Image (cartoon, grey):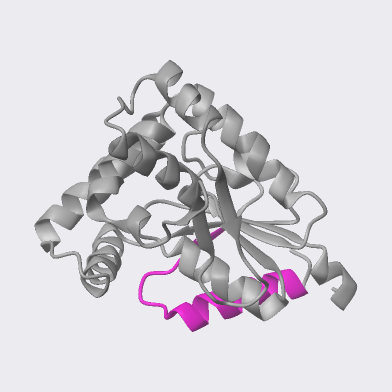
Amino acid sequence: MSEDGLKKMIIAIDGPAGAGKSTIAKMVADKLGLKHIDTGAMYRALALKAMREGKDCTDGKVLIDLLSRSKIEIRADNRCSPAVILLDGEDVSGEIRLPEINHKVSQVAKVPEIRRELVKLQRELAAGGGVVMDGRDIGTIVLPGADIKIYLTASLEERVRRRYHELIQRGSPTSLAETKKQVVDRDRGDRERKTGPLRMAPDAFYLDTTGLTPEEITAKIVRLCDEGG
C-alpha cells in the first residue's frame, strides 16, 4: 500500500483481557505514524469517577448523569509514547490502571447507555482516518468499516502472566491466582454482555500471540497493513 494510503488507514484491534492490545496498538501506531486510541481508557476513566463519588456502576441513569458532567479526553501523538488520559482536566493515566478499577470497569462497560454514548465519541475520534483503535468491539460495532481488523488473543495462561507482570511493574501487589480470577471474570463479562460483546468480526485476522514478542506481533500486523489486508 502507498504511504499516503497507510497514513489514512483505520486499524481496529480487538481481543480479550491481557492479550496485549494497547501495547501492540501503540507499537503499530508508532511504526505507521498513526494516532493510537485506547477505548478501554474511556470506560476506566468513567469507572474511576464513579468510584470516587461512590456511585453505583451498574445503574445506567446514574452513569449517564455522571458522564454528562464529565470530560474525558485522550491526548495521543503519533509516536509510541503512552497516551495521556484526562478526566475533567486531571491526568489519570496511571490511576485508571489500578486493580480496584478492573472490577468497576467491567460493570460500567455492560451498561448499554454508556456504550452508546462512548461509541459516538470513539467514532468522532476516528473520523478522517489515520488511527489505530483498540478495544473489545471496535471491528464489530465502533468501526465496522475499518481497513484492517485484528482479533488479538493468546492462551489464558499467557494472558494471565502478562497481566500479572503488568500489575507488578505498576507497583500493584497481587498474586497469579487473583490475577487469573480477574482475567476469567472479565472474559465472561465481556462475552456475555448484551451490548457490544466481545466477538471476532467475520473479516478480522485472527492472531494468536502466545509465545510471541511484542516486536514479532507488531511486525505481523504492519505486514498486513503494507499488503492492504
- Compared across the picture, whether 198 is left or right of 127 comes to left
- State the residue lying farthest toward the front: 89
Residue 223 is covered by the magenta coloring: yes
Location of residue 122 by image quarter: top right
Q: Along the line of sight, which residue is nearer the eye, 27 or 211? A: 27
Q: Is residue 227 above or below residue 201?
A: below
- Compared across the picture, whether 172 is left or right of 135 comes to left
Q: Along the line of sight, which residue is nearer the eye, 118 or 184? A: 118
Residue 182 visible, this orientation: yes
Q: Along the line of sight, which residue is nearer the eye, 59 or 166? A: 59
For the image shown, how many numbered marks are present on the structure? 0
> x, y percentage for residue 57?
33, 28
Quarter placement of the N terminus = bottom right
- Compared across the picture, whether 73 is left or right of 60 comes to right
Residue at x-position 33% and y-position 24%: 58
Residue at x-position 50% and y-position 83%: 215
Q: Along the line of sight, which residue is nearer the eye, 21 or 122? A: 122
> x, y percentage for residue 179?
18, 56
> x, y percentage for residue 165?
24, 72
Q: Which residues are magenta?
A: 206-226
Residue 39 is covered by the magenta coloring: no
Location of residue 175 by image quarter: bottom left
Residue at x-position 35% and y-position 43%: 48
Magenta residues: mostly which secondary structure? helix
